[in-house]
Structure formats: C-alpha cells, structure tokens
Amino acid sequence: MGLKAQLVKFNQQQERCQTTLTSISRAGQSKANKSQKLTHASIHSSGASVPSPAVKFSSDTERLLKINLIQKSPVGAQIKRVIDVLFKTSGNLTMQQIYDECFVDVRRNKDVFNSLAQNVKVFYDGVCFSYKSKHDVKDKNQLLLLIRQFPEGIPVIDLEDSYPTIVEDLQALKSADLIWLLSNSDSREDIAYPNDPKIQGKVKVDSDLKECFHDIELPSDMIDIEKNLKVNGMKPATNTGNRRSLAQVYGIVPKTKPKEKRRKITNRTKVTNTHLPHLFQEVSENHTPESVNPQEQQDD
C-alpha cells in the first residue's frame, strides 16, 4: 500500500472518531438536562428551598486571616477594639456578640476577660459588658440638666464619651441659647456653661479675677475697642468707622454733651441748710476777705 493510500485511510478513521465523540457528547448533555429538570420539578413539588453553595476555604481565607491576626494581637489592642464596639453600640453585649462584632474571643482569652472586667470604662454585670462613661447621660435633655448642675462650667472632653451624638446635641443647645461654649485660653479646650439667669448668681469669682477685670483700661476711641474685639474673635455690635464716614458725607455734626459748670459756693450764697454745717466747710476754709470783689464791698 502506498503512502497516499495510508494517509486517506487515516483521515477516514479520524472522521469516524470525531463523529462518535460528538454523538456521545450530545447524548450526555441531553441526559444532564433531563435530570436537572426532574430535580427542579421535585423541589418545586416538595416546597423545599434550594441549598446555598458551600463556602470554599479559598473564598473565606481573608476573613480567617483577619481573625487570626486580631486574636494574636496584644491584649491592649484587643481591649481597645472591644471598648470601641461597646461605645458605638451603646448597649449590653454578651461575649458571643462581642466576638461577632470584632472577632475578639473574650471567653477563651482570660487575660482579655480580666482586663476588660476591671477596666474603668467597662461595666460587667456577670453576663453582659457595656460602656461606662464619666457622666451617665443618654440624650439632649439629660445633657442640659447635667450642664445646669455646673454653673462654673464643665469640660466638653468629659462629656464626649457619654453617647455618640453628644457633640451635635451640644451645638443644638448652643444654637438655642441654652448653654455657652467657650474655649479655655490655656488648654484650648471647650467649656460648657449653662445660660440660665437663675443660677448665674451662684458662680463664684475670685477676688484676684475681679481686681484684674477692674484694672483693665478700655481705649478711649470706640474704633480701637472694635479692633480689639475682632482680634479676639468677637463681632462688634457697632461700626463706628462706617458711622463716622457717613456723617462726614452728609455733613452731620456729632452732638457733644456740654459740660455743666459747677457753681461755687461763696459768702454771698444764701445758705438754707444750716442744719448740715459739714457740707459748707469749703466756704469757711477757702473764704478770705481778699477773695471778696471790691465792687461787692462798695455795694455792701
């Protein structure tokens, strides 16, 4: 047999094999479709739900690595994670709930459990953990009542950990003119003061502060006072420069209050209050015969 005849025979065998493989593939696909239809039909007829695909280890590797990293971190870092969760939730959490939130295993890690139970910012009742703030306030009304108990002011930093939205409530109380928020020039910290006339008289002021206040000399010109107010971050209620410029444009002369000339008491003044001689010592001390006008002597 020649080489050409062998090549033709080989090609024919390849075609027969390809045809056989194609028929087998079609037969298998039709059987799979029929079995899938029967499975769906049986599920719908029985009312059972389709089971979710199992999570493979490869798709959950990142979460497992994160859990392992957290649980091998220092005790202090794990305590901080738990305290942050307790503050954000503002509720009582069990050990399992803490694990679900931040992957810290309080039940198995005794060091974490003991440190957490003895922490000043955590309250443990034997079952649940909760956040313990310095002041027990939960809303804006309780916050206002607390501030009114401190006429001399309460630092905002002592209030910030009471509940998550306390900063917004402080600004709302300030906008409603119920409190004042002033900054301490030394520590740069905000201090909350109650704006209540009933308790303003209870504020104690040191004598040194009173003396310092009275020793302050204000500028004689109102423009200088307005400049000092602006330097200290306050908006003046007046605009003297603008008022003076308008007065010059329209030719308005500022009114000056004339000084009243004090009338001197002389020997010719008729004294009626003779029962109060101490008021007229000036006459007896300063009056001399030379101080009398000669014309007045001639008239006498």
Image (tube, helix red, strand yellow):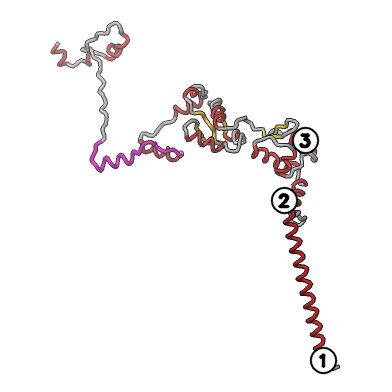
Quarter where residue 288 is shown = top left
Alpha carbons under labels 3 and 2: distance apart: 45 Å
Q: Residue furthest left?
A: 299
Instruction: Tell me if I can see residue 61 in this picture.
Output: no
**Residue 243 part of the magenta segment:** yes
Report whether 120 appears left or right of 265.
right
Mark identifier at residue 5: 1
Circle 1 sits in a helix, a strand or a loop, which is it?
helix
Specify the label residue 114 is tagged with. Answer: 3
Q: Is residue 176 left or right of residue 283?
A: right
Q: Residue furthest right?
A: 1
Q: Residue furthest bottom?
A: 2
Circles 3 and 2: CB atoms closer than 8 Å = no
Q: Disc 2 on helix, strand or loop? A: loop
Q: Which residue is mark 2?
A: 49
At label 1, which amino acid type do we have?
Ala
On whether residue 237 falls in the magenta region, the answer is: yes
Closer-to-camera residue (146/255): 146
| Disc 2 residue crowd, few under 14, some 14–19, many 20+, Cα 10 Å | few
Region rendered in magenta:
233-253
